[in-house]
């Protein structure tokens, strides 16, 4: 059985979850569910990044012990994953003992291959970014992300020989051994790598423990603490029990997909790949990159009062509509906007009307004209061909990290089905040609069965309700369920409540 290991970035625990991380969770969940549906053995990881100077400072400002604040906020991220019906197999926390041991093992593996050296570092440091930045990165003397001036540091650190491994990182990306999607992000990271190669720039990988006490100690040097890269990035293998070369590590590494936001592309497709090369570990197969979400056309900001809380939206409209909006309306690999008006239009137009109304109409007609049972198997070429062509397009989009396009294929098929009903007018044919009505009903019921599978990664609860109503509870697409004519004659069709009741 093929395996599929997918990870999200781990969320930083100095604040509550936001809609951007909710989108990343839902995107990863959609891919994980799709691969389970096609028969892959899936392992899906998410979690929280819990170390760093910013974390300690936030706790101090809140008058709390750092671990207490970490525990409180990590619980909120776990709650979000459960709230959104995310099917992750593990939620890793980097303050765990197992993670620390694994991160130290990775450090030792890099050190064994002469991956580190000690040197004095002088430079500008942004606490918000947990990163050193250059003057050319500043806007009006401030970090462009956090709108605060950086601090000046001079200290002795361990440096990772990043420049040594960059040619091989570049080669892996160019040859496609490490896929970067979308393609314009591949161009972006190759340009960044070229810049770093020309500057022969290495990367600070530790900080003095007196400056950074909240983190993972550097092995064999109590005066140094691991900087974020070797700590946080290593979670992708420490979660698999890399410390003990465990069964999960042997089975699922390398990762098939690291799903991340565009702001951390350099770290995942640059630093992380170089670290794995230095430690002589296999490279991940792909990095998928998504964009940002704005709110009503503006960048989200507490001062503007336009921060979108995923818990609030989910409680008001439902989890499945929220999942659908994030997957269908936000461009999968680019920036998108969260608008209440657009959300409600999508809800009414696509979920309530196109999907919910179709299922309701067809099931009601089945009860009225076929005694609530599936009629005999029938095939009309333009219907079955349309369904199978939709499957081809849908799967191409799913494999190419275009979840939005895959969702659009589903709802184009639903539009086709609704138009078919309006053209055939089975209610008018019922008295004159009842046999023809039964053929029409079979075409529609079988089309809905196919749609229920296509919906499984996007709207898992809705998909399950439809399949249950059809008494077709199989959740695996292959080997037979993708064919036409699988729904058997005489199976009872159970009426269900409105899938998406209209909003007041």
Image (cartoon, rainbow, N blue to C red):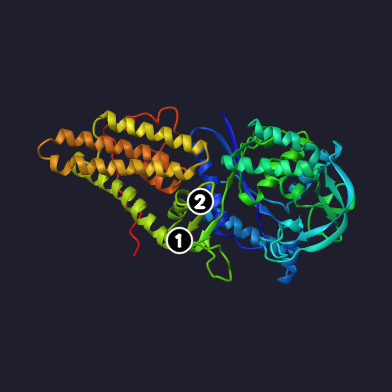
The residue nearer to you, when weighing 96 against 217, is: 217
Q: Secondary structure at mark 1?
A: loop
Q: CA distance from mark 2 to mark 1?
A: 22 Å
Residue 468: tell me if it is visible.
no
> Which residue: 27% across, 35% down?
443
Asked if residue 334 is positioned above or below residue 70 in the image, the reply reads above
Asked if residue 111 is positioned above or below residue 223 in the image, the reply reads above
The reply, left or right, for residue 66 in relation to residue 479 is right
Quadrant that contains the N terminus: top right
Q: Secondary structure at mark 2?
A: loop
> Disc 2 marks which residue?
85
Q: Quadrant of residue 371?
A: top left
Measured as percent of width and height from the top left, residue 110 is found at 82, 39
Measured as percent of width and height from the top left, residue 39 is found at 51, 32
The disc label shown at residue 450, or none: none
> Disc 1 marks which residue?
339
The reply, left or right, for residue 12 in relation to residue 377 is right
For label 2, count other residues whose C-alpha is less than 10 Å away and answer few (under 14), some (14-19) or many (20+): some
Measured as percent of width and height from the top left, residue 118 is found at 89, 48
Mark 2 and mark 1 lie on one chain; the one further toward the N terminus is 2
Measured as percent of width and height from the top left, residue 172 is found at 69, 33
> Which residue: 64% across, 63% down?
15
């Amino acid at each position: 059985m093929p395996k599929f290991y997918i990870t999200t970035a781990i969320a930083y625990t100095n604040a509550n979850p936001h809609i951007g991380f909710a989108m990343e969770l839902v995107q990863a969940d959609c891919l994980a569910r799709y691969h389970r549906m096609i028969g892959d053995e899936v392992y899906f990881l998410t979690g929280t990044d819990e170390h760093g100077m910013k974390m300690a400072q936030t706790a101090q400002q809140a008058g709390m012990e750092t671990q207490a604040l970490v525990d409180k906020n990590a619980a909120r991220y776990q709650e979000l994953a459960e709230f959104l019906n995310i099917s992750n197999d593990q939620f890793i926390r980097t303050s765990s003992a197992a993670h620390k041991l694994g991160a130290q093992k990775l450090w030792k593996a890099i050190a064994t291959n002469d991956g580190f050296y000690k040197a004095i570092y002088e430079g500008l440091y942004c606490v918000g970014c947990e990163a050193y930045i250059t003057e050319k990165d500043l806007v009006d003397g401030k970090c462009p992300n956090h709108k605060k001036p950086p601090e000046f540091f001079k200290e002795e650190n361990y440096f990772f020989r990043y420049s040594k491994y960059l040619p091989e990182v570049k080669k892996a990306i160019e040859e496609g051994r490490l896929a970067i999607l979308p393609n314009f992000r591949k161009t972006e990271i190759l340009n960044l790598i070229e810049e770093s190669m020309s500057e022969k720039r290495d990367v600070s990988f530790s900080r003095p423990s007196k400056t950074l006490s909240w983190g993972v100690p550097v092995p064999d040097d109590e005066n140094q603490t691991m900087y974020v890269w070797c700590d946080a990035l290593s979670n992708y293998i420490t979660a698999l029990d890399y410390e003990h070369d465990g069964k999960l590590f042997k089975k699922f590494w390398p990762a098939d997909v690291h799903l991340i936001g565009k702001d951390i592309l350099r770290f995942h497709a640059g630093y992380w790949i170089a670290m794995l090369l230095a430690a002589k570990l296999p490279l991940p197969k792909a990095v998928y990159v998504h964009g940002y979400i704005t709110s009503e056309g503006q960048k989200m900001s507490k001062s503007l009062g336009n921060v979108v809380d995923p818990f609030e939206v989910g409680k008001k409209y439902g989890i499945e509509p929220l999942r659908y909006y994030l997957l269908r309306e936000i461009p999968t690999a680019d920036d998108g906007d969260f608008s209440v008006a657009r959300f409600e239009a999508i809800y009414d137009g696509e979920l309530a009307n196109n999907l919910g109304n179709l299922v309701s109409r067809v099931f009601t007609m089945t009860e009225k004209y076929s005694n609530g049972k599936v009629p005999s198997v029938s095939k009309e070429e333009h219907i079955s061909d349309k369904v199978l062509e939709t499957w081809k397009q849908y799967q191409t989009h799913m494999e190419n990290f275009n979840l939005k396009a895959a969702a659009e294929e589903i709802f184009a098929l639903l539009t086709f089905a609704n138009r078919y009903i309006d053209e055939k007018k089975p209610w008018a044919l019922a008295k004159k040609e009842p046999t023809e009505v039964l053929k029409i009903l079979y075409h529609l019921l079988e089309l809905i069965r196919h749609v229920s599978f296509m919906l499984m990664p996007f709207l898992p609860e809705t998909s399950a309700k439809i399949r249950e109503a059809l008494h077709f509870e199989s959740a695996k697409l292959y080997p037979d369920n993708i064919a036409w004519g699988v729904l058997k004659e005489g199976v009872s069709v159970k009426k269900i409540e409105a899938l998406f009741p209209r909003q007041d």
